[in-house]
Amino acid sequence: MVEVGQYKRVDNSQIGKLLRGSIDMHIHCGPDIVPRRQDALETALAAREMGLRGIVLKNHSYPTAPIASLVSNLVPDIAIFGGIILDYWFGGLSAQAVEVASKAGAKIVWMPVFCARNSKHLLQRRSGIDIKGDGISILGTEGKLVPEIDEILKVIRDYDMILATGHISAKEIIALVDRAKQLGLTKIVVTHAMSSILSESILKPEERQMLAKEGVMIEHTASEISPAIARADPAEIAAAIKSEGPDNCIMSTDFGQIVNPTVAEGMRLFIGTMIKNGLSEEDITCMIKTNPARLLGLI
């Protein structure tokens, strides 16, 4: 635990300098199956106004590449990307759905989220959404990856997309990353790396550190420290980033919820909080600018 007296001082200009040119790779926009604070156009306008370089739109009701393309035409001077979540209503573990999304411009593929077996029951209780079925696991009865995963990974590799782990379990993540690396994937993100309110099984610190050393990006989000959502200790998030190495991490917001700030303000909040908990400007620049830009092909 970091004591208050150890907090770094931070000023508005310092946060503003870091915020300008940042990229938020995890933003929820409406309309969606859960209420959202802003739609895609409002989100993009707010992000551009606050100087962000790029955003990735995520939605539980539809793949976001087409709307990202439309909004890009309406809001120039900011890069806007979309993706697809492999939940039941998108076809589940469907390589065909991934390929169609890729041809529409999708840059990121999230493994199951609301429908992940590791997350389904927790999310049903939290959101009140009735999710039919047993939930999706990417492991079969013998503990091996189901055959569909290879086909999905090959599409992700061939279209140079980003593989994100969604809400699957720690065991599933490790098996998925191992196979993805065998198939030559180089852009892999562990989503919600420390969020126990969303997943029944999460990675242990040593597992996150192991994956980071293997070149996997570990995502940390503002939602983890939000008093309206996870309420994690910011000092623990900062300590985790230091142990994994900022070169191996990205900072996103995962905002868009009605109870939270707008996504651009959320990034500003996250930057300031991490500075106060001991991360340097160089650390934060790496996680909100350099690493996301490399993943998205902007550098």
Image (cartoon, rainbow, N blue to C red):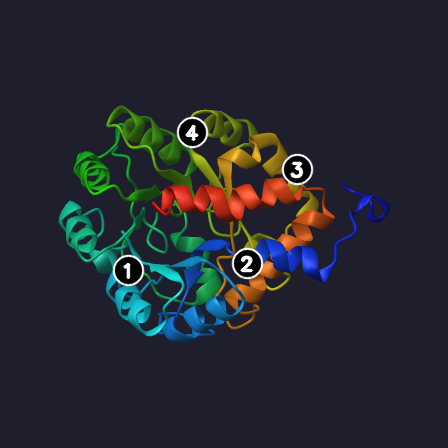
For marks 2 and 1, give the one nearer the viewer.
Answer: 2
Residue 237 in view, yes or no: no
Q: Quadrant of the C terminus?
A: top left
User: Dot 2: within a 10 Å radius of its alpha carbon, few (fewer than 14), some, or many (20 or more) residues?
Assistant: some
Quadrant of image for the N terminus: top right
Q: CA distance from mark 3 to mark 1?
A: 38 Å
Please state which of residues 145 and 81 is positioned toward the viewer in this rendering.
Answer: 81
- Image location of residue 2, percent across then percent down: 77, 42
Q: Residue 298, percent across and down?
A: 37, 47
Which amino acid is tagged 1? Answer: Lys
**Helix, strand or loop at disc 2?**
loop
According to the image, label 3 marks what residue? 239
Q: Amino acid at mark 2?
A: Arg
Q: Earlier in the sequence, mark 3 or mark 2?
A: 2
Mark 4 — residue?
215
Q: Which residue is mark 1?
A: 132
> Which mark's residue is nearer the viewer, 3 or 2?
2
Q: Secondary structure at mark 3?
A: helix
Marks 4 and 3, the one that precedes in the sequence: 4
Task: Tell me what residue is drawn at x 56 percent, y 32 percent.
Answer: 244
> Number of labelled discs?
4
- Position of residue 218 measured from the top left corner of the image (x, y, whole percent): 48, 39
